[in-house]
Every structure is written in C-alpha cells, then in structure tokens.
Image: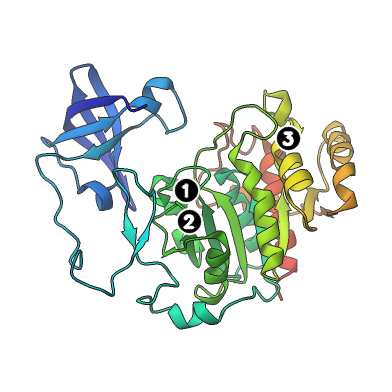
C-alpha cells in the first residue's frame, strides 16, 4: 500500500513538459521527488509536500522518484470552469484515486472535434505500429522518418505503464517530431484525451491527421514473470482494435540478445504471447535482415508457429543505424543503449521503416 512521507522542498532540480523534479528533505533524509504541476500545483523551495515513497523504497520502476501527492499548505486554485461550466470535460481518468483528473475527451459534446469523431469509424488503411515498451517509441519513429521524413506520426499511449504522459522525458523530447499524442484508457496528459484505444486511434487519424500511428504503453512495464502476467498482453488487443477499425497493424517485436533474462532473449515471451495468443487477426511482424546468425535462427524458430496467422516480414536495415544515432532523444531500454542492445532498437526501427511503406 502507500508509504507516506512529509518533507520540505529544498531545491528544484529540472523541469520538462508537465513535470518538475525536486529535492525534498524529510526526517529520513533527502529524496529525489517528482511533481505534476497540473495535479498538485507548482512546488517551490520551502513548500511542504506530502510524498508517496513506496515504489522508490522498494526499488520499483518509477525512475527512482518519490511522487508528490499534495502541497498541503498551498493548494492550487480550482480550474476556471470547475463546477460552473456545463460544457467542460467530464472524462475522469485514474478513476477513484485521490488525484483523478477530469478532462475534455476528444469526442465529448464540448470538444471542437466532436463532429469529426462522431463520423469517424475507419482508419482508412493507416499503418499502426504496436510496441511492447515505451523505449521502442523513438526507434520506431526513427525508422519511419528514415525513408519518409515528412510522414505525420501520432503516438497513441495506452495505460499499461505510467499513466501521466508527463512522466516521459522521451516524449517531451519528441514533441516537435510527432503530430501529437493521444492518451487512452486511464492514461492522461496527451494533446488529446480518449476513453478507449479505439477512439484514440480514430483521433490520431482524423484529428491529428496522422499518416502512421505508434501504439505503446507509457514508461514502465508491469510484469510478474509469469506467462500472462504482464501489461504487454494489450498489444494483442491493440492488433484486434486496429483491424476492427480497418487499419494495418505492424508488430514491433521485442528481440534481444543482450537481456540477461532468458524469457526475453531471442523473441521475448511478451511478443510471443501478445501476437501468438491474444491477437486474433493477422499483423505484419517485422524482422530486420542483419541480425547475428545465432539470434536470427532463434527468432526464426520462435516465430514459426506465429506464421500460421501473421505475416513475418524481413526488412532491410541499411541506413537505420544512422537514423537511430540521429535520434533527438537518448535511446535506452532497461538501462541499455543502442550499442548495448542493438537488436532491440534496430528491430523497432525496421518496424517503422516497414510501416512507412504502407502509408496509403
């Protein structure tokens, strides 16, 4: 459950869109903390803050942060329309938690996009890349723009990892390279808010005008080490949604010869379960053409059972290393960079390159 601390902001370290990193002094010592000003107000040195330190104490995937729950002595004012404007948004996310935000959904009556969204029921063949981890996002984007630099790419963020899009410094660094971000389900903080993955995909196509969309969870990954107990199973459901909306799904496989965990070496069991057991309709599963021989053999054997449903597509990787090296944000997955886990990143980039060839 929640591990509480009370402390005082001793320094503001850095900030990016939607988030502020702090140094907080508590009775137990100095902590690194993160606040989302849209939820808590903007902390300043000297402010008392209430913290949730549970994930930090347990060493879980919050980037080493305690999380600011409130500035109890200096609460932010209500939003201008709160309680008075019938046309304000009514989309509640992180529902029934103490920090649930109430937002304007892209398809609500008060939305300027209501008419477009009410009429939208197809992705018109738009290619959509599905990826297990948030760390694949910049690599997929690099692969798309390697051959189609003018392609408009939207990021559709699911709620399997971090719920606030603001947590992602990667996303902040990619803002100028994306048509926009749509946060779906319980996730929030994107340029557009959607209640479901389906409306999020339609918004990417018809509101943001995307040529390609990338679907992935926010930073972090929930997993128990069991065959079905991980948030990435949602990839299979995303494939089903894309086909239901008449889009073209492209699977970015999680491939690695550097991950120390056997279940993630070769083709990760996350990819094999999501595409092999959850997806009920075909997708293009992309394999780069220059994997090391031993790894390529592992991948071929692992994907053979999936080929009865899906199309396994081999994609040339010439030029992708340069595109990855030119990424506007640092490439990192589980603490490993491009050179440390080349197969992972080049596979994601190859999926992006393939998706670029499918732009209608």
Secondary structure of the residue carrying tag 3 is helix
Q: Can residue 104 be seen in this view?
A: yes
Q: Could you tell me which quadrant the N terminus lies in? A: top left
* x 85%, y 42%: residue: 303
Q: How crowded is mark 3: few (under 14 residues within 10 Å), some or many (20 or more)?
A: many
Where's residue 268, x and y in %? Answer: 72, 35
Q: In the rendered view, does 79 fall on the left or right side of 91? A: left
Residue 174, numbered circle: 2
Q: How crowded is mark 2: few (under 14 residues within 10 Å), some or many (20 or more)?
A: some
Q: Name the residue under label 1.
A: 170
Residue 269, numbered circle: 3
Where's residue 255, x and y in %? Answer: 73, 39
Q: Could you tell me which quadrant the C terminus lies in? A: bottom right
Residue 266, numbered circle: none
Q: Rounded to the nearest whole Å, what is the CA distance between mark 2 and mark 1?
A: 6 Å
Q: Is there CB contact under 8 Å for labels 2 and 1?
A: yes
* x 50%, y 47%: residue: 218
């Amino acid at each position: 459950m929640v591990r509480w601390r009370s402390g005082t902001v001793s320094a503001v370290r850095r900030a990016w869109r939607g988030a502020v990193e702090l140094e907080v002094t508590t009775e137990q010592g100095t902590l690194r903390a993160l606040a989302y000003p849209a939820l808590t107000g903007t902390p300043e040195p000297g402010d008392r803050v209430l913290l949730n330190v549970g994930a930090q104490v347990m060493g879980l995937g919050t980037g080493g942060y305690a999380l600011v729950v409130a500035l109890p002595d200096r609460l932010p004012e209500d939003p201008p329309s709160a309680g008075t404007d019938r046309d304000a948004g009514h989309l509640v996310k992180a529902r029934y938690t103490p920090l649930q935000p109430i937002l304007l959904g892209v398809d609500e009556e008060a939305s300027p996009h209501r008419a477009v969204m009410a009429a939208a029921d197809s992705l018109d063949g738009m290619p959509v890349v599905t990826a297990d981890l948030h760390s694949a996002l910049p690599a997929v984007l690099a692969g798309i723009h390697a051959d189609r630099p003018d392609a408009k790419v939207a990021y559709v963020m699911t709620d399997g990892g971090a719920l606030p899009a603001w947590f992602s410094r990667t996303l902040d660094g990619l803002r100028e390279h994306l048509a926009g971000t749509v946060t779906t389900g319980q996730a929030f903080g994107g340029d557009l808010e959607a209640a479901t993955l389906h409306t999020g995909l339609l918004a990417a196509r018809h509101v943001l005008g995307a040529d390609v969309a990338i679907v992935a969870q926010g930073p972090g990954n929930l997993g128990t080490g069991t065959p079905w107990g991980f948030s990435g199973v949602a990839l299979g459901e995303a494939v089903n949604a894309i086909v239901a909306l008449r889009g073209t799904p492209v699977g970015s496989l999680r491939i690695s010869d550097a991950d120390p965990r056997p279940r993630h070496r070769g083709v990760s069991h996350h990819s094999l379960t999501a595409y092999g057991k959850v997806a009920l309709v075909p997708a293009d599963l992309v394999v780069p053409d220059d994997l090391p021989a031993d790894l390529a053999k592992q991948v071929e054997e692992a994907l053979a059972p999936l080929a009865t449903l899906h199309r396994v597509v081999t994609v040339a990787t010439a030029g992708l290393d340069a595109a990855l090296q030119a990424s506007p944000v640092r490439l990192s997955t589980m603490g490993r960079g491009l050179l440390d886990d080349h197969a992972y990143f080049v596979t994601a980039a190859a999926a992006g390159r393939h998706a670029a060839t499918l732009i209608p």
